Image: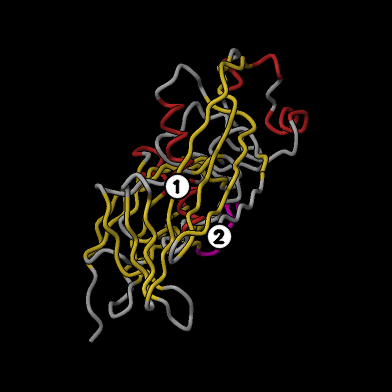
């Protein structure tokens, strides 16, 4: 018996960042190309459409006797979760090296949920599409769409995510410079995350802390369970070389039975390194 559900989400240009590195770019999503051009100052004659590219990922969700298995069809990962009264709880992951996620523009995928087959299918498909862009002669993509389908299988559901986008080449070099929604030059901050804990499986969060009135503090946001590796672009209004020294990024990792661990990075150093890479040893609660 098959049950198919399809939903299309049209999103904006993948940041006018000429290829995000195996990870993520998040932007505000214009609803059509005209709005896109006026939002990011990109005219249609600034780029050439090279091709239509597509990526797919299939992830199965199986629930038996209180245990959940979320597994990619092509073997990238197997997530193990436990059914609890509070909802599924992530237990462990078996993967080929560090699992890498992908984010494309504003496809509204939210944060990766290791216990949700649909969520994992979307992020895996995004990662595969980004890999195709990186290996092509294009600079970025425009107007990506994502389609989800579900098929009932024995003991669970098989989720398939398909992403389609136009691969483009930027003709006007000045159009590759992306400004934030304000007036400062560094409001779009690209970070390569490489976060791990010992033991693994900790929930990791991040937030912006600022001691300057030009940059607002941000509430804590969920990142992913460890280990996590991805490249993402964020909007931090008011960020510039002058204000970066007064802005910090705080990472917190939490795992039941262990004390929370925090690490703080100065944004000025992040601008130079383009990376936040940490290993956090977790200490058991006494």
Left/right placement of residue 45 relative to residue 141 reads right
Q: Nearer the viewer, mark 2 or mark 1?
A: 1
> Front-most of 242 and 143?
143
For residue 146, above or below residue 142: below
Q: Quadrant of the N terminus?
A: bottom right
> Is residue 50 rendered to the left or right of residue 272?
right
State which quadrant residue 40 falls in.
top right
Give the residue furthest to the right.
34
User: What label does residue 58 carry, if any?
Assistant: 1
> Per the image, is 83 magenta?
no
Percent position of residue 164, x then y: 57, 33
Residue 210 horizontal/vertical position (percent)? 51, 57
Identify the colour scheme used: secondary structure
Q: Residue at x 29, y 60 (%)?
A: 93
> From this viewpoint, is residue 134 visible?
yes
Task: Looking at the picture, tell me which residue is in the foreground, 128 or 3.
Answer: 3
Identify the element where label 1 is drawn: strand
Nearer-N-terminus badge (2/1): 1
| Depth order, front residue of 92/151 | 151
The region drawn magenta spans: 213-220
As for residue 217 lying within the magenta part, the answer is yes
| Image coordinates for residue 162, horizontal then vertical, percent | 54, 40
- Disc number for residue 196: none
Q: Callout 2: helix, strand or loop?
A: loop
Residue 205 seen in the figure: no
User: Between marks 2 and 1, how big is the CA–CA gap?
Assistant: 34 Å
Which label was assigned to residue 218? 2
């Amino acid at each position: 018996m098959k049950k198919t559900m399809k939903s299309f989400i049209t999103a904006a240009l993948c940041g006018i960042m000429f290829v995000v590195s195996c990870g993520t770019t998040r932007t505000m999503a214009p609803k059509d190309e005209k709005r896109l051009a006026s939002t990011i100052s990109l005219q249609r004659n600034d780029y050439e459409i090279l091709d239509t590219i597509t990526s797919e990922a299939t992830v199965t969700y199986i629930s038996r006797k209180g245990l959940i298995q979320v597994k990619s069809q092509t073997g990238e990962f197997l997530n193990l979760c436990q059914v609890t009264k509070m909802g599924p709880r992530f237990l462990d992951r078996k993967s080929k090296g560090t699992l890498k996620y992908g984010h494309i523009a504003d496809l509204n995928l939210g944060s990766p949920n290791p216990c949700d087959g649909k969520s994992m299918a979307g992020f895996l498909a995004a990662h595969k599409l980004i890999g195709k862009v990186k290996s092509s002669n294009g600079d970025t993509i425009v107007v990506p769409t994502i389609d989800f389908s579900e098929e009932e299988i024995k003991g669970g559901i098989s989720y398939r995510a398909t992403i389609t986008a136009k691969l483009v080449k930027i003709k006007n070099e000045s159009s590759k410079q992306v400004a934030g929604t304000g007036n400062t030059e560094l409001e779009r901050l690209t970070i390569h995350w490489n976060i791990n804990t010992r033991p693994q499986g900790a929930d990791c969060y991040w937030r912006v802390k600022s001691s300057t009135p030009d940059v607002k503090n941000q509430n804590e946001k969920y990142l992913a369970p460890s280990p996590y590796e991805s490249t993402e672009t964020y909007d931090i209004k008011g960020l510039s070389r002058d204000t970066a020294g007064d802005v910090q990024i705080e990472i917190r990792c939490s795992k039941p039975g262990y004390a929370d661990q925090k690490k703080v990075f100065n944004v000025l150093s992040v601008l130079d390194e383009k990376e936040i890479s940490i290993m956090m040893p977790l200490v058991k609660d006494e």
